[in-house]
Image (tube, grey):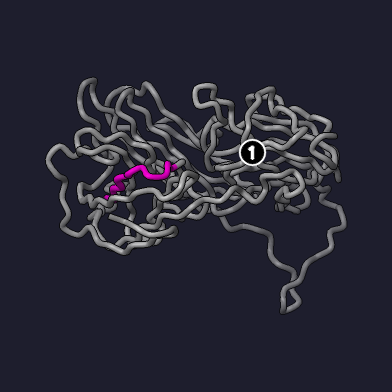
Amino acid sequence: MLAGSLPIERSRSNVEATLEVNENSIDPFAAGHSVWFAWEATLTGWVTVGTCESDFATVLGVYVGTALGDLTKVADGSDSEGPHCPNGQREYTFKATSGADYAIAVDGDSFFLPPASPPSGEGSFALRIESRPPPSNDDFQEAVTLEGKTTEEPGGDRFHFAPAFGFNWGATKETGEPSHAGDPGGASVWYSWTAPGSGVARIGACCSAWQLFGVYTGSSVDGLTQHEPTFDPPLGNSFSVKVGTTYRIAIDGKFDAGAVAAEMGGFTLNVSMQLPSLPKSAAVTPSFNSAGSVPPKDTEPPETFIHRKVLKSKPPTIVIRFSSSELGSTFRCRHNKGAFIPCRAPITNRGRRPGRHRFEIAAVDAAGNVDLSPAITRFYVPQPNRRPKPS
C-alpha cells in the first residue's frame, strides 16, 4: 500500500515478474512482466501518475476494483499525456476521489520495429504520484506567449512555426469569457501570439479532437473581438492575420453534459503560417559566428521520429504519431508500396485489410532538405475474431 502525502515516489523492478491468473494485459504491447501497487487517495482532485524516470519503456494502468478479473480502468498510458514525461515513457492525469482505493499496474512495453530485437520489457522503474495544480495560463491575463521560429532564406519558402505543450486539467472559465467555437466549454487556457506577417495562419493541437479553439484580439477577457477559425481541408483550422497584430488564443474542452463538465487533457499546440519568399536580391544582414565567417546555408536533412503506435482490437485501429527534429517541417508518407504523398500527424488507420502493413514517413525541413532515411513502422491487422499481434 502506498501511503503518505503527495508526491509519492517509489523505485522498483519488474525483473522476472509474471502475469497472474485472470490478469488482463494492461496494453496490447505489454510484455507480461507486471507489478502492482495499491494507493488510497487522500484528496479529491487532479492527480498525475507516471513512470517517467525509468530505464526502459513502460506501460501503465490505473484501476478501481477488488478483483483482478473485475477491474475498471480509470486512467491508462496509451499516450504520454502528462506535463513532462519524455517520449517512450508513460504518464496519465485523472481526477481522483478522496478515500477511493486505486490499483496501479506497471509493465514493460514490448513494441519494436524490425530489424531491431524485441525488448525484454524488464528493468528498474520509478513510479511517481503527484497532485496536478491548475495550469498557470488558466486566466486571460496570464496567457503564455508563443515564441515562434521563422526561416530566413532568400529565394526559398519561409515558414513560421510556434509550438507549445499545454494542458487544461483543473482549468476554469472567467466571468465574461465568451463561448469558444460556440460551445460552453468550461476549462479554458490562454495563449498569446503575434503574427510575423500577413496572410493565413493555421492552428492545431495534437493529438485528440476534444479541443475548442477561440482566436481573438483585445486586451481584456470581456472585451474581445472574435476571429473564428474556419476549417479548410488543406490547412486545417485557419484564420487570416495581419503582421504585428497580437492574437489571443483560447483552448477549451467540449462541454460534456453527462459529466456536467468540460473535457480535459494534455496537448501540443502549434500555430504556423507560410510567409512570402524573400527576393534573392534582397539585402540580408549576415550573421557571423565566433570566427567571423558567414554560416553556411542549411543543407542538413532533418530526422523523422515515430512516437507511438496504438492498436485497438475492436475494430482494428492503428494511430501513428510522428515528428521532426526541426521545427517547421512538413512530412511525406507512403503506405506499403504506394507513392509518397503529403501527410501530417496523427495518421489514423481503420478498416485496413487483414495482413501486414508498412508506413514510411519522411520529414522535409523548411529549407527543403528531405530525410533520406524515412522512419518506418509496421503493423499487423488480424483476421476477424483473431487476437491482434505485433509485427
Q: Nearer the viewer, residue 194 or 92?
A: 92
Q: Amino acid at mark 1?
A: Thr
Is residue 103 shown in magenta? yes
Q: Nearer the viewer, residue 146 or 306?
A: 146
Check the image and name the residue furthest to the left: 21
- Image coords of residue 252 (percent x, y): 63, 34
Residue at 27% x, 52% y: name it.
37
Residue at 52% x, 34% y: name it.
208
Above or below, comparing residue 8 to residue 328 in the picture: below
Residue 8 position by quadrant: bottom left
The quadrant of the picture occupied by the C terminus is top left
Give the extent of the magenta segment.
96-108
The quadrant of the picture occupied by the N terminus is bottom left
- Image coords of residue 240 (percent x, y): 79, 32
- Left or right relative to 225: residue 86: left
| Callout 1 secondary element | loop
Above or below, comparing residue 239 to residue 58 in the picture: above
- Left or right relative to 128: residue 345: right
Q: Nearer the viewer, residue 376 or 63?
A: 63
Residue 374 visible in this rendered orientation of the protein:
no
- Image coords of residue 369 (percent x, y): 59, 50
What is the crowding at mark 1: few (fewer than 14 residues within 10 Å), some, or many (at least 20)?
some
Residue at 17% x, 54% y: name it.
17
The residue where tag 1 is placed is: 172
Residue at 52% x, 46% y: name it.
323
Q: Nearer the viewer, residue 19 or 376?
A: 19
- Left or right relative to 56: residue 70: left
Is residue 202 shown in magenta? no
In terms of secondary structure, what is the magenta stretch mainly? strand
- Image coords of residue 169 (percent x, y): 55, 42
